[in-house]
Amino acid sequence: MTEAMVRLDAVGKDYGAVRALSPTSLEIAKGEFLTLLGPSGSGKTTILNLISGSIAASAGTIWIGGRNVTGLRPNQRELGMVFQNYALMPHMTVFENIAFPLRVRRCSETEIRKKVDEVLDVIGLGGYGARKPKELSGGQQQRIAIARCLVYNPDLILMDEPLGALDKKLRDQLQLEIKRIHRTLGVTLLYVTHDQSEALVLSDRICLMNGGEVEQIGTPEDLYFRPRTVFAADFLGESNILDVSVVSSGTEAKLSTRSGFQIAGVATSLSAPTAKIMIRPESFAVATDGEQGPNTVTGAVEDVTLTGGVVDIQVRLGGAETVNVRRLTTRDFRAMERGRPITLSVKSSDVMVLE
């Protein structure tokens, strides 16, 4: 079993009568990239601040690298922090900003020069040492903030929404840069974000938070394709969530939609007569006219939206039921005019019955 770099044992946080984090147990493996994902107030930043020592736990024990750090100050925990606002010192050069934590640790000038040059190469900014932060772009400044953490080789780096202030294109570029740095150095990284796509791109595992509790934890594939609850299915990625009646239960349950379509889906156990199912927009296939078979539904095109590389097709199945279908964009996408009859099919393995 992989050694745990961080372990929370029933760690909770209360502010008077307000519970910010219910007692939570969580492990982060050495070298793992774990993302805390969730809406505002879900508890993700509370967990990060408890691990960093910025706030004290109301209950439980925090372990980092096998040490009980529950009562230690932040500077005694030997970890790095990267914030959204870069926190660079404007009067210092790039070199001096990165060298600062080494000077605090009283490293020799030879060692400082060597380590700063090495980390500048790692982040792809070799030769930028003499510049001031104001001479750099936002993405370059964020890379300098990351380099300042990497330079003293902490066992653990915490990142609190570090890309939140950047535009989308730059954010996408920095995501790949952070992923490359993590793979190159193998450092343990705990990342906080509310951006679902960012979590899917970066993470080895995602811990989805909701209301001060862990909703679900697993790989990006687990949470995207096998969400266990309605909240998980609705929060991560786009989804079609439909109410169904249970016709028969089992490993492959037989279900009936409100529009009367019979459909099979993946279920572990069903005890109630009704349930909800989740189908991702890209899981639908558009069948040829008149084609029928297992797990097919028919409806009418209600709207078509071009979003770049993909086209979203809103399909009304009947009554109040509408589903979104996603297809790769082709030049003839306009042929899906409003009101056109359409038949959709979906594999039973792509129909998830939710708790």
Image (cartoon, rainbow, N blue to C red):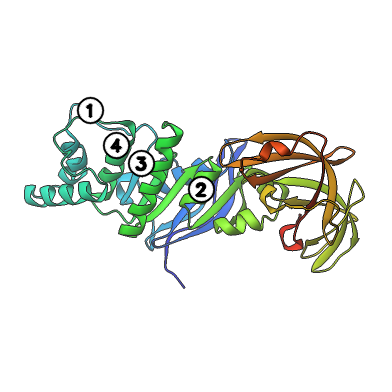
CA gap, disc 1 to disc 2?
30 Å
CA gap, disc 4 to disc 3?
14 Å
Task: State yes or no: discs 4 and 1 in contact (Cβ < 8 Å).
Answer: no
State left or right for residue 236 relative to residue 293: left
Amino acid type of the residue tagged 3 in the rendering: Val
The residue wearing badge 3 is 82
Q: Which mark is residue 140?
A: 4
Of labels 1 and 2, earlier in sequence is 1
| SS type, badge 2 | helix
Q: Position of residue 198 (x, y in %)?
A: 49, 45
Amino acid type of the residue tagged 1 in the rendering: Glu
| SS type, badge 1 | helix
Indicate whether 278 appears above or below 88: below
Q: Nearer the viewer, residue 163 or 81?
A: 163
* Quadrant where the image shows the C terminus: bottom right
State left or right for residue 82 relative to residue 240: left
Q: Which mark is residue 199?
A: 2
Q: Position of residue 111 (x, y in %)?
A: 11, 52
CA gap, disc 3 to disc 2?
16 Å
| SS type, badge 3 | strand
Residue drawn at (71%, 58%), measured in percent from left and top?
A: 350
Of labels 1 and 3, earlier in sequence is 3
Q: Quadrant of residue 237?
A: top right
Indicate whether 4 appears above or below 333: below
The residue wearing badge 1 is 135
